[in-house]
Image (cartoon, grey):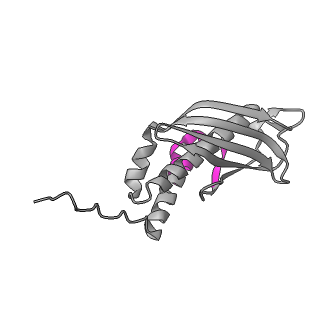
Amino acid sequence: MDDGTSKESPKTPRSAAEEARLVAAITDLFEHRITFNGFLGFRIASLAANPVRIDFDMRPELIGHYLHGRLHGGVISSVLDVTGGLAIMRAIADRHDHEPTVAVLRRFAHLGTIDLRVDYLRQGIGERFTAEGEVVRLGRRIAASAMRLSNEKGTLVATGNATYIVS
């Protein structure tokens, strides 16, 4: 008979092995299953919480202004959007650190961009670019992130802010 005094067992944090499985699964999802990311050459450089980092190399297919060899504005907005989304994914995984990888991945099913603001600060000139994203707020239904894009010299090219649906 339950007298109401039983306590729920404490949730065990994710093991190092399970964390490695999670990172591998998110990397596969991000770099291979979301084929648009692969097409643009986006690679996860860091999946550590705040900031996550995405790297990519300049290629002729990414040029928006052929005379100057500048990165296309659509590529800039895309990388900022997916970087913000990746930061939210990491935060969701951390919030549910007691769940196995398969359960965490299911939580990403409803993740989608609601709003994205991009400020283009300088020309996108460089050989390599890095986007960083941080979670500003993770709620039950809505999340917000802030992102930055820089070239290999550390020159800030663009910033962004976005909101995402998470459930």
Q: Position of residue 167 (x, y in %)?
A: 44, 37
User: Which quarter of the figure is the N terminus placed in?
Assistant: bottom left
Region in magenta:
28-44
Q: Position of residue 34 (x, y in %)?
A: 53, 42
Q: Which SS does the magenta portion mostly show?
A: helix
Q: Is residue 39 visible?
A: no
Quadrant assignment, res 39: top right
Q: Position of residue 13 (x, y in %)?
A: 42, 65
Question: Quick one: 10 or 82, which is closer to the camera?
Answer: 10
- Furthest residue toward bottom: 16
- Total count of labels: 0
Q: Is residue 71 visible?
A: yes
- Specify whether residue 126 is painted magenta: no
In this rendering, position of residue 91 left or right of residue 128: left
Residue drawn at x 79%, y 48% as measured from the top left:
150
Question: Quick one: 30 or 109, which is closer to the camera?
Answer: 109
Quadrant assignment, res 160: top right
Q: Position of residue 109 (x, y in %)?
A: 43, 40
User: Considering only vertical position in the picture, is 7 above or below 129?
Assistant: below
Residue drawn at x 27%, y 62% as measured from the top left:
7
Residue drawn at x 57%, y 49% as measured from the top left:
31
In this rendering, position of residue 33 left or right of residue 117: left
- Specify whether residue 33 is painted magenta: yes
- Furthest residue toward right: 67
